[in-house]
Image (cartoon, rainbow, N blue to C red):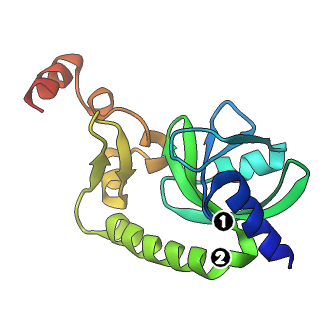
Amino acid sequence: MFEDQNTSILDTYFGTHSPFWRLAFDSRALELSAIKGTTNIAIALNSVQTMKIQSLTGVTASLDIEIEIYGHPLHLHLVGRKINDKEWGGTASAYADTESVARDLVMGLSFAEQVVSEANSVIVILDKEGYVQRFNHLSEEYTGKKEQDVIGKNVYDLFMTAEEGASSRKNI
């Protein structure tokens, strides 16, 4: 019964069973929304909850968290990762209602992440602006830099002189 209420509450406030979530590096407010990039509701987190989310790395993972929305307690299952050096994000689901879905999602994403992480090739995934999204194990070995330290940083600033970065940007 309680699980059904959690799903119903998410549906009522977001129109979906799996709203998007986001946490900024300088905030203790978990932002929940039906549409990625907007905020429908911001929920105050305690320091333990905030640290739990901020411990996520660039590898997709899951964690559970208990919050309250307008007086309704919710046990959520968060699936997400560190998006850049200033935020974490992903999707939230009523914990008991979607545990198997979240587990399957994590297993599927974990396999993809494992392929990227353990490939015998240097793999650096960038967004269109040149910000590092993924940095695999071999990249760490070659550069001496850890993925957690380069996620969200600009590749031009990390690995090129200002002149090289400007020249490279012109060619892309």
Quarter in which the N terminus is drawn: bottom right
> Picture quarter containing residue 156?
top left
Which comes before the other along the chain, label 2 or label 1? Answer: 1
Identify the residue at image location x=44%, y=49%: 147
The answer to which of 20 and 47 lies nearer the viewer is 20
Q: Secondary structure at mark 2?
A: helix
- Residue 142, how many percent across, how many down? 29, 50
Q: What residue is pinned by disc 2?
A: 98
Q: What residue is pinned by disc 1?
A: 93
Name, please, the residue furthest toward the left. 171
Horizontal arrangement in the rendering, residue 35 relative to residue 32 (left or right): left
Say what amino acid the circle numbered 2 marks: Thr
Name, please, the residue furthest toward the right. 71
The answer to which of 154 and 164 lies nearer the viewer is 154
- Residue 71, how many percent across, how many down? 91, 51
Residue 95 vertical position relative to residue 79 in the rendered view, above or below: below
Quarter in which the C terminus is drawn: top left
Identify the residue at image location x=31%, y=42%: 127
Identify the residue at image location x=63%, y=35%: 25
Identify the residue at image location x=51%, y=46%: 36
Say what amino acid the circle numbered 1 marks: Ser
Labels 2 & 1 near each other (Cβ < 8 A): yes
- Residue 50, how many percent across, how many down? 74, 45
The answer to which of 32 and 8 lies nearer the viewer is 8
